[in-house]
């Protein structure tokens, strides 16, 4: 007790020292004024003291849980247990589907528009999940593929007057193509190099879009992009938003089905095997190059498609919308939700997009919290909010024939 | 070709390159020991520069002047950067030792974002002008159009720092322990080296180097904001990979190559694509020689 108290006091003191110049002093070298914010010391001291107790408790809890898991005790929380129950899961999915269908009828355009943004991030998260979650290829420039899709639509629409439906597959294919293009040179690289090269690719995309003015109109961006059409019907802004909402819902459902099927396919299992142990995987005869490339290409495909939807929704895009911060947000969606888990990624996207939207007062703390959350998640809950559901085969006695089919 | 213009670009590239090298050393040392890209290293550099700015600002207002400020600001910046580096390792990386490779990397990215936004919120999103702390020497006047006093100071400081670092690693007891840990972590532990302490020390040394780089570059370029660490960090990491990650002379070489290529490309062509050049260079190197210029090609053991 006394030892812990002493330790926490020391930690608290250490953080007061650590944060002193940045949190207490604010200097303006233009006007030569210094503001001393002594009050912050108190907050830091109390905060660090309390958090150090939480930290210790969480570390102890983590240790207990790993021990339990080693002994084979069920460590799933109630939520996880409920999700593992197939019957319950199907019902929940049906309810969600109905909710999604009636959402724009119940809520106004503004809410629908926010929901569209959230769903765009769901697709992005699911796409990135293929690379990061399933194949274990960290991609820090994922937003570039999103940008490729968005710019494809914007440019084709402005120059050749191509419509949304025409470009939607083109955007996906182009995203896919860039994925392969990027994938080729870095196939031989290990995970960490991959991270830095993809980060570079993301930045290259942004800089090229800023400077290649004849193609992309530079930093000022492309405006007046057409909204998606429906057999030439004239639509008001509200109707158009609702229409886009249904398009993106359809896209989300498609993504979920495809990624879910992929996960349990031959390719999907190869991805997971590659993530777990590359050497063993190659030794088992899996073509590493093809498997990695397919993960990249498929991940990029969804980003390209949803990029087209994004451009059609906002009707304006510029390079500033495709920065590393966006990639970081998509990555935190995947990490927070649970790498490899489809349900987790969906939940993660909703939390990360909707919370800052409704808690406007805290929106400036958004990235601060995301950053801290990524680290904390890795330490205390690496499997994410909802961990990857594993295929469970259960033997239910000889009367039940489905057990043999499964 | 104009030889003076060439020399000017040569020295500006050398100056830039030596600062990249200082930061790259931190990446390479950490990677050599625990095979982790410390993504937040660029942020440590930024924090070093910011602390120096704050100290310098306060000192100027309370009437100190010139050289005294430079020394004081640099000293405090180094102490704080070391403290941040140490704390960072303790909080974000140590609990993750032994987890899958992706976990500490994601944790590092999280910390990088966290520290950026911490400085952004605690201080300001704007660029702040950094006071001109490095005096201009009279004896440099004849060649001032080729190489200025700040550049000279930066080059000499970097040189001294690197010599000291080499001595520390090659000659001292601690350096020996670091080399042993780099070769084989579990074996080093078996022969009685306190591996945790060595890792902490590596972070501290890397952070000190980054802080020196931060103070130098801030007084050279003349402005600081919360975002400077990100790009500098990425470039420095590229420098480390270019030279062969894990290799200390490699980091210096890589830093210089990047510094020169940026400076010459901007001087003779256009600076539009300056930041992209680094990455193109990185991709080319990784395809041609993934181990880097001076890196050893390691066979993967199963």
Image (cartoon, helix red, strand yellow):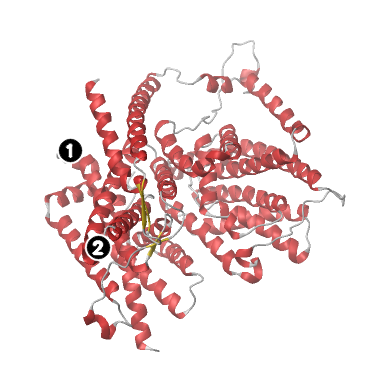
Give whichever of A252, A106 is nearer the camera.
A106
Q: Residue at image x 68%, y 57%? A: A316
The location of residue A104, given as percent across then percent down, is 76, 36
Q: Residue at image x 66%, y 55%? A: A150
Name the quarter where the C terminus of chain B is drawn. top left
Local SS, label 2: helix
Number of other residues with Cα within 10 Å of mark 2, as a class: few under 14, some 14 to 19, many 20 or more: many
Task: Give the labeled residue for mark 1.
Answer: B190
Left or right position of B172 against A139: left
The location of residue A59, given as percent across then percent down, is 34, 28
Number of other residues with Cα within 10 Å of mark 1, as a class: few under 14, some 14 to 19, many 20 or more: few
Tag of residue B70: 2
Q: Residue at image x 36%, y 33%? A: A47
Left or right position of A318 against B105: right
The quadrant holding residue A107 is: top right
Give whichever of A187, B22 is nearer the camera.
B22
> Can residue A265 be seen here?
no
A216, above or below A393, in the image: below
Chain letter behind tag 1 = B
Left or right position of B202 against A78: left
Give the Cα separation between the discs numbered 1 and 2: 44 Å
The location of residue A232, given as percent across then percent down, is 87, 52
Name the quarter where the N terminus of chain B is drawn. bottom left
Local SS, label 1: helix
Q: Mark 1 touching mark 2, by CB under 8 A?
A: no
Chain letter behind tag 2 = B
Give whichever of B52, A175 is nearer the camera.
B52
């Amino acid at each position: 007790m006394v030892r812990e108290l002493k330790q926490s006091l020391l930690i608290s003191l250490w953080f007061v020292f650590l944060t002193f110049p940045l949190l207490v002093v604010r200097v303006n070298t233009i006007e030569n004024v210094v503001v001393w914010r002594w009050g912050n010391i108190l907050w830091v001291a109390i905060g660090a003291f309390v958090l150090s107790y939480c930290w210790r408790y969480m570390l102890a809890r983590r240790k207990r849980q790993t021990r339990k898991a080693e002994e084979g005790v069920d460590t799933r929380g109630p939520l996880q247990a409920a999700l593992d129950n197939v019957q319950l899961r199907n019902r929940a999915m049906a309810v969600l589907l109905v909710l999604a269908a009636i959402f724009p009828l119940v809520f106004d355009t503004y809410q629908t528009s926010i929901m569209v943004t959230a769903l765009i991030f769901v697709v992005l998260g699911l796409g990135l999940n293929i690379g990061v979650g399933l194949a274990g290829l960290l991609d820090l420039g994922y937003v570039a593929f999103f940008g490729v899709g968005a710019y494809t639509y914007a440019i084709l629409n402005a120059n050749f007057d191509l419509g949304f439906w025409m470009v939607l597959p083109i955007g996906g294919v182009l995203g896919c193509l860039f994925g392969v293009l990027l994938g080729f040179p870095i196939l031989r690289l290990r995970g960490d190099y991959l991270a830095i090269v993809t980060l570079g690719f993301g930045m290259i995309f942004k800089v090229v879009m800023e400077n290649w003015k004849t193609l992309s109109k530079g930093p000022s961006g492309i405006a007046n992009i057409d909204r998606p059409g429906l057999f030439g019907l004239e639509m008001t802004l509200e109707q158009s938003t609702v229409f886009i909402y249904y398009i993106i819902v359809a896209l989300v459902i498609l993504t979920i089905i495809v990624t879910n099927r992929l996960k349990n396919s031959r390719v999907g299992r190869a991805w997971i095997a590659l993530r777990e142990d590359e050497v063993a995987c190659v030794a088992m005869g899996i073509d590493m190059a093809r498997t990695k490339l397919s993960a990249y290409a498929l991940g990029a495909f969804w980003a390209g498609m949803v990029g087209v939807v994004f451009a059609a929704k906002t009707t304006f895009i510029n390079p500033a919308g495709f920065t590393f911060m966006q990639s970081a947000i998509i990555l935190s969606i995947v990490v927070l939700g649970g790498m490899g888990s489809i349900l987790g990624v969906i939940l993660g996207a909703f939390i990360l997009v909707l919370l800052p939207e409704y808690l406007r007062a805290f929106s400036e703390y958004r990235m601060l919290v995301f950053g801290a959350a990524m680290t904390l998640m890795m330490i205390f809950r690496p499997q994410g909010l909802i961990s990857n559901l594993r295929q469970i085969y259960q033997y239910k006695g000889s009367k039940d024939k489905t057990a043999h089919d499964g | 070709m104009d030889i003076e213009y060439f020399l000017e670009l040569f020295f500006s590239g050398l100056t830039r390159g030596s600062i990249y090298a200082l930061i790259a050393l931190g990446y390479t040392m950490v990677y050599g020991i625990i095979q982790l890209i410390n993504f937040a290293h660029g942020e440590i550099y930024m924090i070093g520069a910011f602390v120096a700015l704050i100290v310098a600002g306060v000192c100027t207002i309370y009437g100190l002047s010139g050289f005294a400020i430079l020394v004081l600001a640099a000293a405090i910046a180094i102490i704080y950067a070391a403290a941040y580096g140490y704390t960072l390792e303790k909080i974000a990386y140590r609990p993750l030792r032994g987890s899958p490779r992706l976990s500490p990397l994601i944790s590092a990215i999280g910390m990088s974002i966290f520290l950026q936004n911490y400085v952004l919120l605690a201080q300001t999103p704007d660029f702040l002008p950094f006071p001109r702390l490095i005096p201009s020497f009279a004896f440099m006047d004849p060649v001032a159009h080729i190489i200025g006093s700040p550049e000279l100071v930066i080059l000499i400081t970097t040189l001294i720092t690197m010599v000291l670092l080499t001595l520390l690693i090659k000659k001292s007891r601690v350096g020996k322990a670091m080399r042993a840990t780099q070769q084989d972590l579990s074996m080093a532990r078996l022969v009685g080296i306190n591996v945790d302490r060595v890792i902490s020390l590596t972070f501290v040394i890397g952070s000190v180097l980054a802080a020196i780089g931060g103070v130098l570059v801030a007084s050279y370029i003349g402005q600081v904001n919360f975002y400077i660490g990100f790009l500098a960090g990425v470039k420095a990491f590229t420098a480390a990979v270019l030279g062969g990650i894990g290799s200390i002379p490699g980091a210096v070489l890589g830093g210089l190559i990047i510094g020169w290529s940026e400076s010459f490309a901007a001087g003779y062509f256009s600076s539009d694509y300056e930041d992209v050049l680094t990455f193109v260079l990185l991709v080319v190197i990784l395809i041609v020689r993934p181990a880097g210029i001076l890196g050893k090609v390691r066979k993967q053991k199963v």
